[in-house]
Image: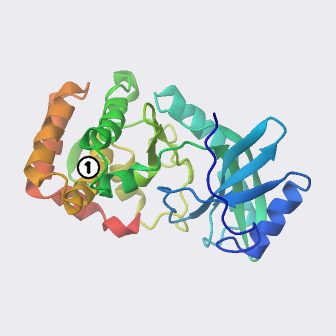
Amino acid sequence: METLLTPTKPMIEGELMELEGAILRDHEPSAIFETVDAPGMSQGRQSRVSVLQFKLSRGAELIVWKRMGVGKGLTEGEAEALHSRLRPYRRQLRNFGWNVPKLFHTHVAQVDAEWQIYSYEQYIPGGDAEFAVRDSAEPNFRKWQLLRAAIETLGEYPSDKLVPRSLLGQNITCLPHGLDLKLANLVSDGLVVYFVDIFGTKELSDDGRWLTYNRKLDSLPEDNLLAVCATREGAILRLFRLAEKSWIESGSLRKESIRAELQIVLSQSNIPKGECDFIMNEVSLGYPWLDMLYSETAI
């Protein structure tokens, strides 16, 4: 039986701007739908996210409706360029083992003085890891499931697709693409962990540079962003630091226990010992490399 959520305010009221509602009504003139509450769903820095409940002859269906590039002042050309890379980037992530929600439809829309990308995506119940890790009532084994799934997926990348590189003072392992790997972008339905954010796309060119880099979306310099999002060490360190902070604040585990378990998770993954040692050393020292790369609030 399909689980339905509780309807909130009508489409044109509440958190949805009138222009967004008008665009949606124009795109779906005959469909019957309403926004619904979706507990445990974070709002991104550059996207606004809602859950729509469509009333269909076969029953109700929940869809994630995203407005990507909100408040970024994208031009039509910039929005079109980013839009054109969504599906190639999603395919690349899937090819490397990530579970990514189905992307039903996307289009570019003008909203007042800027251009945004609208998407209609598969709804994954369960809430994201940012809410889960902060929740002291959430079992710790569920929190570890989220982290372990991400770390093990990174550990399964084929070695011939990884590039050793010296970057910003460290010898690290470059991935074939970048990921905005943070807690809010991981969602578990109880069995499967999904990576749910493909905007803005973090593809790399053949020479290891960003394919689409836009300062309107990313405040970090290109190399710093590479180190945080497109290296295995940087991606894991960023994800774990966010998780550790929320975990400790929830009071459900002590720092020592969390770090000891991370070492076990890393040792049981397919990540080489040298990378694991670097990660654990950074954690034990208080993340000095990450501190050099960026302020956590910047990306």
How many labels, in total?
A: 1
Q: Is residue 6 above or below residue 158?
A: below
Q: Position of residue 187 (x, y in %)?
A: 46, 44
Q: Position of residue 155 (x, y in %)?
A: 31, 29
Q: Which residue is mark 1?
A: 240
Q: Is 166 on the left or on the right of 29, as rendered?
A: left
Query: Label 1 is placed on what type of residue?
Result: Phe
Secondary structure, mark 1, is helix
Towards the viewer: 283 or 77:
283
Q: Residue at x 20, y 28 (%)?
A: 272
Q: Can residue 236 be seen from the camera position used here?
A: yes
Q: Position of residue 297 (x, y in %)?
A: 36, 69
Towards the viewer: 272 or 67:
67
Q: Residue furthest front?
A: 1
Q: Is 281 on the left or on the right of 234, as rendered?
A: left
Q: Can residue 178 be seen from the camera position used here?
A: no
Towards the viewer: 15 or 295:
15
Quadrant in which residue 285 is drawn:
bottom left
Q: Residue at x 38, y 22 (%)?
A: 158
Q: Residue furthest right?
A: 30
